[in-house]
């Protein structure tokens, strides 16, 4: 299945070719965490993700046409 992956900040280095936004072909039923680990991302590194407009957990499953946005934690004051 095909998904769109968008990565921001320092996490962008894990995306294909260091690009911000790419389309990827992934296996059916793959989770957010499985995808990120497959890209070589260390799961101890802080990250947040949005999956199709909703805050995502590592265990959430991707589906055909999903948009996954991964970004570092945001702090403000």
Image (cartoon, rainbow, N blue to C red):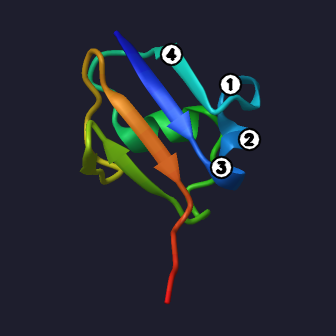
x, y percent for residue 58: 36, 50
In the picture of the structure, the residue carrying the numbered disc 2 is: 13
Q: Looking at the picture, tell me which residue is in the foreground, 36 or 6.
A: 6
Q: Earlier in the sequence, mark 3 or mark 1?
A: 3
The residue tagged 4 is: 23
* Residue appearing at x 30%, y 51% in the figure: 56
SS for tag 1? helix
Measured in 3D between alpha carbons, the distance from the residue under mark 4 to the one under mark 1, in whole angstroms, is: 9 Å
Q: Are marks 1 and 2 in contact (CB under 8 Å)?
A: no
At label 4, counting other C-alpha atoms closer than 10 Å, the crowd grade (few under 14, some 14-19, many 20 or more) is some
Element at label 2: helix
**Badge 2 density bin: few <14, some 14–19, many ≥20, Cα 10 Å:** some
Measure the alpha-carbon separation of dots 3 and 1.
Answer: 11 Å
Q: Position of residue 77 (x, y in %)?
A: 49, 90
Q: Is residue 39 left or right of residue 6?
A: right
Which residue matches tag 1? 16
Q: Earlier in the sequence, mark 2 or mark 4?
A: 2
Residues at badges 3 and 4 in contact (C-beta under 8 Å)? Answer: no
Mark 4 in CB contact with mark 1 (< 8 angstroms):
no
Name the image quarter holding residue 31: top left
Mark closer to the chain start, 4 or 1: 1
C-alpha separation, residue under disc 3 versus residue under disc 4: 16 Å
Q: Which residue is mark 3?
A: 11
Label 3 CA crowd tier, 10 Å (few <14, some 14–19, many 20+): some
Cα–Cα gap, marks 1 and 2: 8 Å
Q: Nearer the viewer, residue 66 or 34?
A: 66
């Amino acid at each position: 299945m095909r998904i769109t992956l968008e990565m921001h900040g320092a996490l962008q280095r894990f995306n294909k070719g260091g690009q911000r936004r790419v389309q990827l072909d992934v296996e059916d039923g793959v989770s957010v965490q499985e995808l990120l680990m497959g890209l070589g991302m260390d799961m101890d590194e802080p990250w947040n993700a949005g999956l199709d407009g909703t805050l995502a957990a590592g265990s959430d499953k991707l589906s055909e046409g999903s948009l996954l946005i991964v970004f570092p934690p945001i702090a403000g004051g």
